Image (spheres, helix red, strand yellow):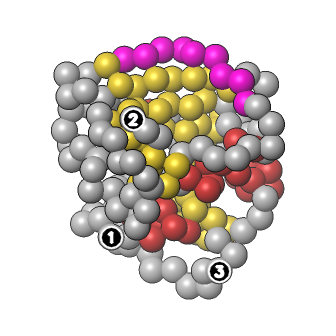
């Protein structure tokens, strides 16, 4: 099974403002930067509860009919947006991956800072695609934080775009 991350950060490494606001991100539907090609390979998206709550504020459900797993030990009922395929799971990242693998899932997209950090620490992510947005926020929610050990990365590719976005792809070295 393949487990990947595809995420945008500010140049100083933040994925959201301290209040979870994403108003600094480029407008959806702007310059293509590989997301559509990436998401077409994904069987299931795994996100944390806070990321799910942020996504619920969007005008439309961004994941179309791709199944989404929300990780939470707190949610008991979930408002399922129209057209969404959604379920709530709890457990360690390795348990989540095992459950999804048993269902035949081949490619998981992991999103949300805490969720990404947990899957990285568990050694489950094979590929990271990080797109730097040309802005310095100065503070916010960092993509990376304290890890239990170094995680070595192999650089695969970097592409820059006219808008100033810079996308870098890494393979996590086992």
Residue nearer the viewer, 1 or 137: 137
Q: Which residue is farthest bottom? A: 77
Graded by Cα atoms within 10 Å as few (under 14), some (14 to 19) or many (20 or more), the crowding at tag 3 reads: few
* Residue placed under numbered mark 2 in the picture: 11
Is 95 left or right of 19, judged from the image as shown?
right
Residue nearer the viewer, 18 or 138: 138
Question: Mark 2 or 3 closer to N-term?
Answer: 2
Please tell me whether mark 2 sits on a helix, a strand or a loop. Answer: loop
Please tell me whether mark 3 sits on a helix, a strand or a loop. Answer: loop
In the image, which is nearer the foreground, mark 1 or mark 2? 2
- The answer to if 7 sits in the magenta stretch is no
Q: Are marks 2 and 3 in contact (CB under 8 Å)?
A: no
Q: Which residues are magenta?
A: 151-159
Please tell me whether mark 1 sits on a helix, a strand or a loop. Answer: loop
Disc 2 from disc 3: Cα separation:
33 Å
- Name the quadrant of the N terminus: top right
Disc 1 from disc 2: Cα separation:
25 Å
Residue nearer the viewer, 83 or 57: 57
Instruction: In the rendered structure, find residue 5 and report the number of the disc placed on it.
Output: none
Residue 64 rendering spot, x and y as whole percentages: 37, 55
* Residue placed under numbered mark 1 in the picture: 57
Question: Mark 3 or 1 closer to N-term?
Answer: 1
* Residue placed under numbered mark 3 in the picture: 74
Based on the displayed image, in which of its 4 quarters is residue 30 positioned?
top left
Is 18 left or right of 27, judged from the image as shown?
right
Question: Mark 1 or 2 closer to N-term?
Answer: 2
Residue shown at 26%/22% (left/top)?
Answer: 161
Q: Is residue 101 visible?
A: no
In the image, which is nearer the foreground, mark 2 or mark 3? 2
Residue 136 rendering spot, x and y as whole percentages: 34, 41
């Amino acid at each position: 099974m393949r487990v990947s991350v595809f995420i945008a950060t500010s140049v100083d490494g933040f994925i959201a403002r301290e209040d979870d606001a994403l108003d600094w991100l480029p407008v959806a539907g702007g310059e293509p930067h590989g997301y559509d090609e990436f998401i077409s390979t994904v069987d299931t998206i795994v996100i944390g509860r806070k990321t799910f709550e942020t996504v619920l504020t969007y005008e439309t459900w961004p994941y179309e009919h791709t199944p989404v797993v929300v990780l939470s030990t707190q949610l008991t009922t979930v408002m399922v947006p129209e057209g969404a395929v959604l379920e709530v799971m709890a457990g360690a990242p390795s348990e989540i991956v095992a459950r999804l693998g048993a269902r035949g899932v081949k490619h998981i997209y992991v999103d949300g800072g805490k969720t990404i950090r947990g899957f990285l620490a568990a050694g489950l992510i094979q590929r990271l695609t990080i797109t730097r947005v040309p802005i310095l926020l100065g503070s916010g929610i960092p993509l990376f934080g304290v890890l239990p050990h170094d995680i070595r990365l192999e650089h695969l590719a970097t592409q820059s775009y006219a808008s100033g976005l810079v996308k870098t792809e890494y393979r996590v070295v086992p």
